[in-house]
Image: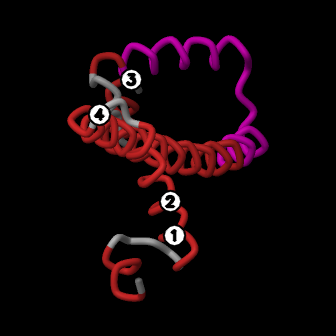
Amino acid sequence: MTEWYQQLDCISKSEFIEKAIQFYVSYLTAEDGGSYLPNAFLSTMKSIVAESDNRHNKMMFKQAVELAMLLNVVAASFKIDRDTLGRLRRECVKEVKKTNGSFTLDDAVDWQEGNE
């Protein structure tokens, strides 16, 4: 068990035992042995996707917090009237759509230089 739990990327021996029991119970409750492997594969894939979603959600939350902080600093530093802000938002939506979401700071500088 000491060798296997590390090879299977388990954090602890307890996690390895838990996975082994889940595997065995799933095997015992399968209708027939031939259908178990596809179910095991599906279950594994669902777990991988769920973990990936969880990581992405955490990352997006952290980025949203940082963006909120940045936006508050910008709003406190510059007095932008609501009409200008609305026009800027409409133009930014157009630019982001045009670049398929890959709008960078360099793009913004180029765009600002073209709108002066």
Q: Is residue 12 above or below residue 49?
A: below
Residue 78: image location, x then y, percent:
71, 39
Closer mark to the observer between disc 2 and disc 3? 2
Q: CA distance from mark 2 to mark 4?
A: 18 Å
Label 4 belongs to which residue?
32
* Residue type, numbered disc 4: Asp
Q: CA distance from mark 2 to mark 1?
A: 6 Å
Element assignment for label 4 = loop
Q: Which mark is residue 21?
A: 2
* Residue type, numbered disc 2: Ile
Name the residue located 34 percent from the left edge and 87 percent from the top edge.
3
Q: CA distance from mark 1 to mark 3?
A: 63 Å
Q: CA distance from mark 3 to mark 4?
A: 68 Å
Name the residue located 48 percent from the left edge and 49 percent from the top edge.
25
- In the image, taking residue 18 as reference, residue 105 lies left or right, namely left
Contact? badges 3 and 4 (CB < 8 Å): no
- Tell which circle, 2 or 4, labels the residue nearer the N-terminal end: 2
Comparing 10 with 84, the one in front is: 10
- Tell which circle, 4 or 1, labels the residue nearer the N-terminal end: 1
